[in-house]
Amino acid sequence: MKARTATRRTAVALTGLAATGLLASLLLGPAATTPGDLRDFILHGDTTYAVIFIHLRLARACLAFLVGAALALSGAVLQGFFRNPMADPFVVGVSSGSSFGAVLVLVLGIRTGAGFAVQGGAAFISGLTVVGAVYILSRRKGGFKVETLLLTGIAAGALASSLTSFLLFMRADSFEQAVFWLLGSLASADWNQVAAVAPLILAGLAVAQALARDMNLLSLGDDAALALGCPVGRIRTIFLVLATLLAALSVSVSGIIGFVGLIVPHWIRILTGPDHRRLFLLSSFAGGVFLVYSDLLARTVLAPAELPIGVITAAVGAPFFIYLLQRRRP
């Protein structure tokens, strides 16, 4: 009963924060606008502000919400997968692998392609490739151990990061553009990106919710889960692929944004409990809200200049995570 009450209160609070964040995202930016301008646009369709409110600010807020939701859901899945609240998309190498692919294409001088930028496609493919290699290297006869997968992922991520640094060392003139991928940004957000990632992220959430009960069983240990009828090997593979796809998809449109997949699921778990049937959905919602506010700060703190969004999430996330760790100590 307490868990249900906490879930309802958390959902209501997140809904209020989401509405407030969306309104602030529409009103604040380099071009000065007022609530009256927004009201006139809604009521009378003033085309003067259509580009600002719809094509720039609303598209960016929607993409921020989707990316935050995907990163938080990926983190929640991986924390359940490894049974470790310290896990996030970085530990399996997907973020580092994605940034390597994007920077490689950038250094080669390839800029745009059909639909997504070529860098985004390269980030997505390289992130999946790295995790695929990690999975293959971690397998042994009869399956694989989670500990081996974790250590292999950390090593692969370190290797990908070192290769990215080498590329930037060889082509220092590309460093400024590479900051987008290394620290994250939503400056290039548009409705094409929103339309491309929204169905995939929603499908990922649907899959996670459908298998949330199995994740609850996995949290009891593989032997107990098997005894309770959970096909452990297949479910683990599905969750690993799902978390990888969500993280790679996020990096492909926003670059690397840290701490969202780490702190948001941990925070929701403290508020509502460990049941993944609640955790997956609320983590996605909270991750989206968190990134909307982070992006709002990134583009207004030093306006008209813009901070990388990863700077904001790290500045907010690191102290908050330390607080959570201290709060949990006996």
Image (cartoon, helix red, strand yellow):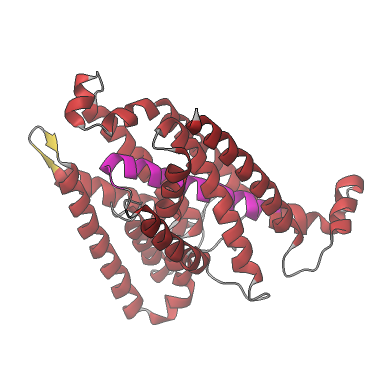
State the residue in front, 188 or 242.
242
Q: Position of residue 144 (x, y in %)?
A: 15, 39
- Say whether residue 192 is magenta: no
Q: Position of residue 115 (x, y in %)?
A: 55, 50
Magenta stretch: residue 70 in it? Answer: yes
Residue 281 visible in the shown view: yes
Q: Which residues are magenta?
A: 58-84
Q: Residue at x 45, y 49 (%)?
A: 267
**Residue at 29% over, 40% down:** 81
Q: 23 and 255: which one is in front?
A: 23
Q: Image check: 87 left or right of 23?
A: left
Residue 294 drawn above or below residue 149: below
Which x, y percent locates residue 221?
Answer: 21, 33
From the viewer's perspective, tell me whether residue 13 is left or right of residue 29: left
Residue 60 is left or right of residue 103, and the answer is right
Residue 110 visible in the picture: no
- Asked whether, in this view, residue 32 is left or right of residue 155, the answer is right
Q: Quadrant of residue 246?
A: top left
Furthest residue toward left: 141
Residue at the location (53% across, 65% down)?
A: 309
Relative image position of residue 42 (x, y in whole percent): 85, 47
Number of marks: 0
Q: Main secondary structure of the magenta part?
A: helix
Q: Is residue 168 above or below residue 243?
A: below
